[in-house]
Amino acid sequence: MTRPYGGRLFKPTPTPPVQPYTVIGAKDARYEIVEKIDQYEPGEGFLPVHINDRLGEDGDGRYRVINKLGSGSYGTVWLCEDLDPQQPGECRWKAVKITMCSDGGIESGLAEKRIRRDVMERCRCAPAQAFEIGLGIPSDYFEIVRDGGREVYCCLVSPILRGEISEECFYLSRNDPKLLDFCYNAALAMQSLHKMEIVHGDFRSTNILVQLPGMDKLTLHDIKQIWGKPRVIMTEGKPNDHYPAYLAVAARPDYEKLKECLQVYYGDKGEELLDQPKIAVVDFGGSWNPKQKRKKSTFIPTAYSSPESYSDTYYVSFESDIWALGCAIFYLLTKKDPFCHGIAGAPHMGDLMREWEEFIGTPYPNSKVRAATLEDAMRQRVTRKMADWRKTKREAIDKTGARSYLEAALLVAGIYPPAVADWVDLFKRIFTWRPEHRIKIEDIINHTVFEHCREDEPEKAYPFDK
């Protein structure tokens, strides 16, 4: 409609389109999770993604970008709506991880694809069933190819998960049954992997996430209420095919709003859904079958690495996973890593071996661990006697009346008798110098510390037991 004004015709000013995001300044994003623009380097960086983009194989646009969930060393993760679910009743809210197009990113993505195939073949099940046994394998995989095939981005689709298991356990009492259930379920997930002859290779608390059930009932309005409106930082310069117009900040879900939404659809059971200790082990980019391939080391952080990782004699294998599981369980119980906790930067080999010795005694006589490569000062620290221990550790032992630093560490963390004796026994059997002396995953699951978990656990028919 036009309206006369001053002898001229004017059209009403059109209403500007509503932006699907909120722009924030770089100062407001100081403490937010956001990647750097340099990580979008052409030919080896991230894929530029914007809100409302459509992702999918061969440009089918099956997944619509709603918000951003996070970013890491090898990729970005996006909250997407699946516009074409393949199964009846399938949840349409998905997390899509897009790896970098660098060699490392592609290798990681292809490894995830391979493990997904192996799990589905060995379990004879769909990815959704694998989640039931704690394995967060991708539900879908596709590739985005650009620049005439010179840029390949691996895209891994999975259900949306909650935070890391360590975040969920942080406020739990050391004697809370739910904390014990989390530890037990982590061991069960590892057992499932090992039954399929798969070594995870990076089994630590940051790769054990908590499942988020009940998402299938949520509407787009609910999702936007829970994760909020996307927040972005505008980039300098003109955006192009390689650089995005803005960097999206990782959204934090409002769990109170999520609880309210679940109660609308599930009633009183909505809160129970969020309280379930269901986990999903993720990040299979470094996983392998040791019968098909042998490795001397993995990319697991030093604090989680086992003695055989530094050996000329051994290969890392299932036993190395057991060691990492022990580190993860210890962290969940005490809120501290068993080894190298509080050491700034990359721990020195001497620091690591010293901590091993304080926990599990002196190395075996014919050790091939590379102690010979240490400087003299460090070598002396590796073979200390009780009297040479640091004062703080000696005081901890004296105050608690413990018989070892391992027992003292558990007592200080609030794990009291009689449970502490059982935990000391389990950790001593996990943390051994020789991998062949290490406890098996089945024995961990059947250990006394998890007796109540086994009693409460419903009978499960695992796919590979059929």
Image (cartoon, rainbow, N blue to C red):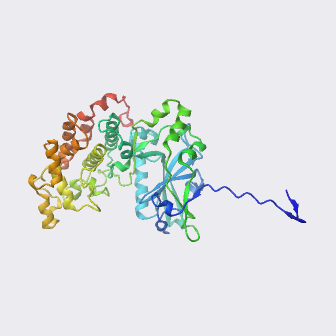
The quarter in which the N terminus is drawn is bottom right
**In-image side of 291 versus 148 (left or right):** left
**Which residue is depicted at the point 57% across and 45% down?**
225
22 vs 450, nearest the viewer: 22
The vertical placement of 344 against 167, above or below, is: below
Residue 433 can be seen, yes or no:
no
In percent of width and height, residue 273 lies at 46, 35
Q: Quadrant of residue 194?
A: top left
Which of the 4 image quarters holds residue 442?
Answer: top left
Can residue 112 be seen in the rendering of this structure? yes
Q: Whole-percent x and y of residue 318?
A: 27, 48
Place of residue 269 in the rendered image (x, y in percent of width and height, measured from the top left): 49, 30
Identity of the residue drawn at 38% across and 54% down: 285
> Foreground residue, 425 or 252?
252
Q: Is residue 159 above or below residue 311?
A: above
- Which quadrant of the figure has residue 281? top left
Horizontal side of 190 relative to 7 (left or right) equals left
